[in-house]
Amino acid sequence: MARHKVEISGVNTADIKVLTSEETDALFAKMKNGDSFAREELINGNLKLVLSIIKKFNHRNENLDDLFQVGCIGLVKAIDNFDLSHGVKLSTYAVPMILGEVKRYLRDNNSLRVSRSLKDLAYNVLKEKEEMTKQLGREATVEEIAEKLDVSLFDAITALEAMKSPVSIFEPIYNDGGDTIYLYDQIEDKSNKDQDLDINLAVDHAMNDLDKREKYIIDQRYIIGKTQMEIANELGISQAQISRLEKNAINTLKKVLK
């Protein structure tokens, strides 16, 4: 079967050599005797370990070149600290170190920093959820988990939400063959929120300059939605009077709001 060339950080993954156990032991013996080339061969002969680990993080849209280089740091640390006398395979020792290095990189380079206490709570919630689900025979609710852990529902939900990966506002969320709809298309524009608040406060202040009857007419006309005739019947006056009072009230509001 033909091998496809895939390069990561300048390394052709199709040409990576995989060492046998005998070759690994022999190279470690040479490295312990000061052979620097043996160390390099050990690194190059175990790059497949790094590749197998970083594949697990493909869904995160991380730069594979960066992850590969970070994983190689973990591999080098493993090789430098490995002891053949322990009777374990290099891969058994190296995989946790490579994985730890990659996870540390992702944690430290995350745009959203989550406190250790929040991470610990999220871990406990997920662990408890798994155990309770087995016991109950159904998926445990967050309320049940929070009660079992003796934490507030708010804290439990916050911890779980904090562990979710951030999503780009340019993430496509729908495409029917035409124009793609992105997440930012669905985000409400609240840029004028402060301005709207100022206007509302100004209107409330201006309403104080109206007399009781004018204020009632404005409320009934523009908040409740009644007609002038309906208000006239309620107050026992003519529609023409309601129209005049309404007009005077609006003029007063315009003057105050200028």
Image: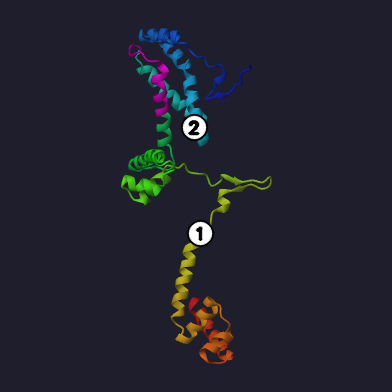
Q: Where is residue 87 in the image (x, y as percent from the top left)?
A: 35, 13
Residue 39 forms part of the magenta stretch: no
The residue that label 2 is drawn on is: 57
Q: Rounded to the nearest whole Å, what is the CA distance between mark 2 and mark 1?
A: 36 Å
What residue type is disc 1 on?
Ser
Residue 94 image-quadrant placement? top left
The residue that appears at 33% across and 42% down in the rendered structure is: 117
Q: Position of residue 96 (x, y in %)?
A: 40, 25
- Residue bounds of the magenta highlight: 84-100
Q: Which mark is residue 119?
A: none
Compared with 57, 24 (above or below) is above
Q: Where is residue 4 in the image (x, y as percent from the top left)?
A: 61, 21
Compared with 21, 194 (above or below) is below
Badge 2 local density, few (<14 within 10 Å), some, or many (20+)?
A: some
| Number of numbered callouts drawn | 2
Camera-side residue of 33 and 48: 48
Q: In which quarter of the image is the N terminus?
A: top right
Q: Mostly what secondary structure, the magenta segment? A: helix
Mark 2 vs mark 1: which is more N-terminal? 2
**Does residue 157 appear in this view?**
no
Camera-side residue of 121 and 215: 121
The residue that label 1 is drawn on is: 191
